[in-house]
Amino acid sequence: MKKVKLVFPILMILSPILMLAQVDFPVFAGKVKSIKSTEHSIVVKTENAFAEIYAYSPTVIRIRISRTEPKSDFSYAVIQQPASSFRDLKEQGDAAGFKTDSLEVVLFKDPMRIVVKSIKGEVISEDYPSLPVSWQGTEVVCYKKLFADEKFLGLGEKTGNLDKRGNSFENWNSDVPAYVTNEDPLYQSIPFFIGVHGKVTYGIFLDNSFRTKFNFGASTDEQFSSFSAANGEMNYYIFGASGIAGIISDYTWLTGRMPMPPYWSLGYHQCRWSYFPEFQVIGIAQQFRDKQIPCDAIYLDIDYMDSYKIFTWNRDKFPQPKAMIEKLNGMGFHVVTIVDPGIKVEKGYFAYDEGVANNYFAKYPDGTNYIGSVWPGRCHFPDFTKEPVRKWWGAAFSRLIEPGVEGYWNDMNEPSAWGQSIPNIIQFDFEGRKGSITEAHNIYGLEMSRATFEGTKALLKGKRPFVITRAGFAGVQRYSMVWTGDNDATDDHMLLSARMVTGLGLSGVSFTGPDVGGFMGNPTEQLFTRWMSLGVFTPFYRNHSAWDTKSKEPWAFGPNVEKMVKEMIMQRYRLLPYIYSAFHESTLSGMPVARSLAINYTFDEKVYWWKYQNEYLFGDNLLVAPVSCNQAAARVYLPEGGWYRLSSGEFYQGSSEVTVDAPLNDLPVFVKASGIIPMQSDIQYTAQKPSPTLDLHIYNGVKPNSYTYYEDDGMTYQFESGQYYQRNINFEPGNKTIILTKPEGTYPSKFTTLRLIFHSFDDMMTIRCDGKEYSLKLRSARERTVEIPAGSGPVKITY
Ligand code: MIG
């Protein structure tokens, strides 16, 4: 500590001199020369830098620091504008301070150093005392004080532990087939993390698409954390809402939230590289129906195309795509096709000809189109940082939409080229600003997803597109769901996938999932079965595997596994009303569907423990404990409150570590005491009508619980004009009432009857519902049921 404090002031004085000598020595922002407040910001000049500080909302502060005076302001991630200037700008001696309703920013002048506090005066985040923002070459770094107990969460799709302290990470979207379980970087760049120290939580989002690095106290003698960008501005946001849920809500307000996905995309998906020709695709679909295993989606990987040319069909293997898809639709299947960005260099191929004619491709500085090799051979790459290119790309989906494709799977968009080393000089338009791939690389997948989403949304005329992407950047949730790429068929990957899914969830991306069963390699029967059961409780439930692996459909491992796996998929479908409501909640608040326990139990140390860090809440009322496949029993941590095992109804007191059975057909999943879970009857695919009776499971507890049930047509955007069905279910154990509020919206629910299933309400045999008495049936030792009309007004139940 001492050493650092003494050395840096001296070095800062020397730095301009050393710069002249062309030594790779840091240039520090230095002393504040002037501070002025404008309508929307505080503008600061320092010896070597320009800074601007904005309040986007009372809990969202933006800090922007650059060596030269910033001319433009540009972001692909952020969709909001600064709100108002700070109030109470006060300059006093060595510091200036300004406030919002929730936060206070203190700017120290010598050297410039920023401290953000809560309005109560707790320090949330502060620049490391003797290391102000600095540059080395074009790289810019910000150093923050590391608190003794500080934890670091999020950062999107990352490997490693839930708490990332002591490690450093890089963001550079990478095609990493068969990545190892500590690989970094992977496919996505989401330069946003959440810090926890004392009783404080905060978030930091570095909005810079160059290669960025985050150091959470790795190799710094536990003194500071830092984040840096290879080029561009030190442009970051500090989120100071109290609590992680509030921070995620603010972050997704700033960068956008997931739009409502089509209902069918929450079902089970069957994929493989590749199902072809046509008769195999139909055959797989038919086997699902024959075996009565529910499934909603079947995928066409790269072999559906003619020589891997995007937006074409291989007519030998798929002579009549439209007729084939109609047939699949008739069987209740939706078709998803892969699209890669590389456009084959081939005269006469429409995408090549149009792209060349209109200057749609990324270029060398001399204006020639860049060529890299991918699946189709030599390819050009669309410049998605140009509006006309996005429009063109989007419109080309008519070639898939016309025959009936409903899902668009964006692959290889890191962008990947064989060799993975696209030269830094390749040029992109950046909406006229111009930039090279060093800046465009990390947002390439984001803008490709955007082009796909906006284009298909327009073509589908009111129907919701389903977009899937491998690469992305902060804000990707606005356009696409994210799958976690080419994992392996191992237990470690299965467990890691839980952390990656919840890590993405902490970082604004709710609709995520891994290749269930593992992409590379062949899972054992046990691993396959276990992973299929974890998939039930994962936002995205897709089985996928590589071309050189054995078949992995639910029946591929023999009748025993098939029976277990069939029951698991059926459970997913029974749970869809619950899952759909969780997705809807996420579209409104950004709250992920799969929630690390760190969100609700932030200050409970045990949720960060190595052995419990994979646990998460699935929606608000279920807790999932991933277990490796050969473990017959599991040690599980149940946080505060009470918990019921979903499969048996057995009760466990919370704040306890328990050992529970974990046979392959029964993943440890628990329902929160006072939890409410709506479930429907068995269906084979989402378009099939369930019985008109909705099961409403209510688990006894002592705490009140409010649950929001949501339904709509699952297909269109008509819910935006009121065509939805939403109802709160308020369970108040204190006064023994359950109130179903009057349904909101104009959409008629699929369900006209509610079967209330009371769990562990031991001596209760009657209820009163709107004054009328109903007697309960004993369904099992712990379950009592009764059917009541769903009703169109409020319903009050007392017991
Ligand atoms: O170079 O399209 O991650 O899911 O099956 C591999 C073939 C290209 C990578 C994707 C994977 C997909 C595969 N793709």
Image: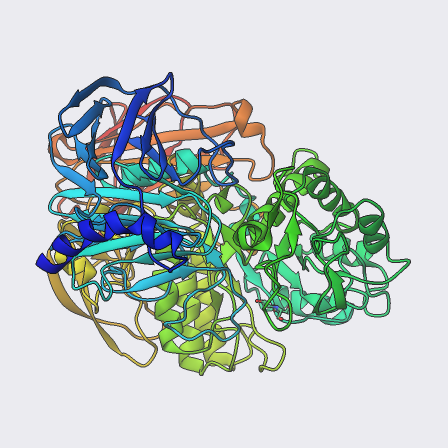
Q: Is residue 133 above or below residue 184?
A: above
Q: In this rendering, would 387 be left or right of 725?
A: right
The one nearer the camera, 67 or 444, is 67
Question: Relative to 279, is 176 on the left or the right?
Answer: left
- Residue lying farthest to the left in this orientation: 2
Pinpoint residue 594: horizontal percent, then vertical percent.
36, 52
Residue 155 visible in the picture:
no
Q: Quadrant of ligand 1?
A: bottom right
Residue farthest right in this picture: 348
Q: Position of residue 277 (x, y in %)?
A: 77, 71
Q: Between residues 784 and 134, which one lies in front from this camera angle?
A: 134
In this view, 86 is above or below 498: above
Q: Quadrant of residue 450?
A: top right
Q: Nearer the viewer, residue 562 or 121?
A: 121
Position above or below: 351 against 630:
above
When the figure is inspected, residue 109 is found, relative to residue 13, above or below; the finding is above
Residue 325 lies in quadrant: bottom right
Q: Which quadrant holds residue 269?
A: bottom right
